[in-house]
Image: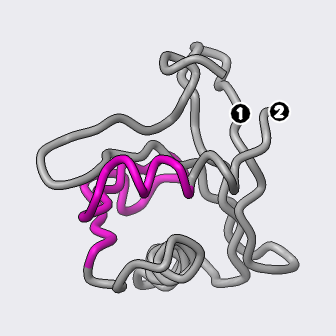
Amino acid sequence: MGAADLPWQACAGGLRLAVRVTPKAGRDEIAGVSVLSDGRPVLLVKVRAIPDKGAANEAVARLLAAKLKLPKSAVRLESGATARLKILTLDGDAQQIAADLRALAVVR
């Protein structure tokens, strides 16, 4: 995976992360990295929560915070509140977060 194939990039204070969320899944999990039909890479995230009143967004933030050992307040939704495709900002050490994401990601 080259840098252009990754769904995250360094930004001021952390990383920006492109995510494709599947709500109402059987379990909460990070299902790897995939490339959309338009060529954009995304991190695939599945959550059990339903997409109602922000429940799925909250579940995504909790899951990423737990897996990346970040405080939940360090995971912020930048865009896509009502869409499956979202942009999140992860506050913290960009290199460490990127390394942790690489360890969790599986190329699909």
The image's colour scheme reads one colour
Marks 2 and 1, the one that precedes in the sequence? 1
Counting from the top left corner in percent of width and height, residue 101 is at 57, 52
Crowding at mark 2 (Cα within 10 Å: few <14, some 14-19, many 20+) = few
> Residue at (43%, 38%) from the top-left corner?
8
> Residue at (37%, 47%) from the top-left corner?
95
Task: Label 2, secondary structure: give it.
Answer: loop
* Quadrant of the snapshot with the N terminus: top right
Determine whether, in the image, residue 26 is placed left or right of residue 5: right
Counting from the top left corner in percent of width and height, residue 42 is at 58, 38
What is the distance, in whole Å, between disc 2 and disc 1 at their CAs? Answer: 5 Å
Counting from the top left corner in percent of width and height, residue 65 is at 46, 78
76, 66: nearer the viewer: 66
Check whether the beta carbons of the residues at disc 2 and disc 1 lie within 8 A of each other: yes
Crowding at mark 1 (Cα within 10 Å: few <14, some 14-19, many 20+) = many
Counting from the top left corner in percent of width and height, residue 10 is at 28, 38
Amino acid type for the residue under numbered disc 2: Arg
Magenta segment range? 74-100
> Residue at (32%, 61%) from the top-left corner?
90
Task: Say which residue label 2 marks.
Answer: 108
Amino acid type for the residue under numbered disc 1: Ser
> Residue at (80%, 73%) from the top-left corner?
25
Task: Say which residue label 1 marks.
Answer: 34
* Quadrant of the snapshot with the C terminus: top right
106 is within the stretch colored magenta: no
Quadrant assignment, res 2: top right
Compared to 38, does 69 lie above or below?
A: below
User: Mark number for residue 45?
Assistant: none
